Amino acid sequence: MFSSFDSEILFAARLLLGGAFVFAGLRNIQNAAFLTQLMTTRGVPQARLVLWLGIVLQTVTGALVIAGIWTAAAALCLVLFLVVATPMFHNFWDHQGPERASRINGFVGNVALTGGFLALIAQSL
């Protein structure tokens, strides 16, 4: 039914998935001091360096996904990023009430993003 729109649908998927990470990476620049402190309290060694590496990874691989360049490799990098970042920033098990609900929502959202990237990887191979 949609076979004539395959490339447009795939581009929209890449734009939405990759764009979310370009946006998040740029937003994290504004929150760098807070995020560095949070990562330090969670025991991340050299938190500032790790944060900036994460920001670069998010923005560069997100842009590669959008552009359709090295899509499978870029998507895999973002899956690995999500596997590391999700329990660090969406640790719902350490919270109660509205804060717990918010963290659960972020956790589930990242699980869904992981699924989208896995589908993109499968399509790219």
Image (tube, rainbow, N blue to C red):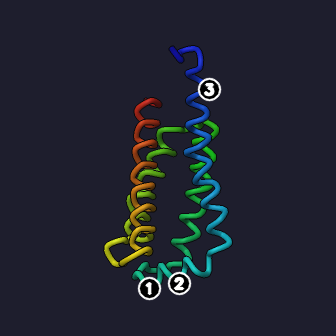
Say which residue appears at 40% left-offset and 33% top-offset: 122
Asked if the residue at tag 1 contacts the one at tag 2, i.e. Cβ–Cβ closer than 8 Å, the answer is: yes
Q: Badge 3 is on which residue?
A: 8
Q: What residue type is labelled 1?
A: Thr
Closer to the chain start, of discs 1 and 3, is: 3
Which label lies toward us, 3 or 2?
3
Q: Which amino acid does label 3 sit on?
A: Glu
Q: How crowded is mark 1: few (under 14 residues within 10 Å), some or many (20 or more)?
A: few
Say which residue appears at 57% left-offset and 42% top-offset: 65
| Nearer to us in this view, 11 or 2 | 2
Question: Height in image: 78 above or below 121?
Answer: below
Q: In the rendered image, which quarter contains the C terminus?
A: top left
Q: Badge 2 is on which residue?
A: 37
Which residue sits furthest left? Answer: 93
**Residue 7 locus on image (x, y percent):** 59, 24
Asked if the residue at tag 3 contacts the one at tag 1, i.e. Cβ–Cβ closer than 8 Å, the answer is: no
| Nearer to us in this view, 74 or 66 | 66
Say which residue appears at 43% left-offset and 74% top-offset: 98
Question: Height in image: 38 above or below 125?
Answer: below
Q: What residue type is labelled 2?
A: Gln
Q: Badge 1 is on which residue?
A: 41
Q: Distance between the Cα atoms at labels 1 and 3?
A: 44 Å
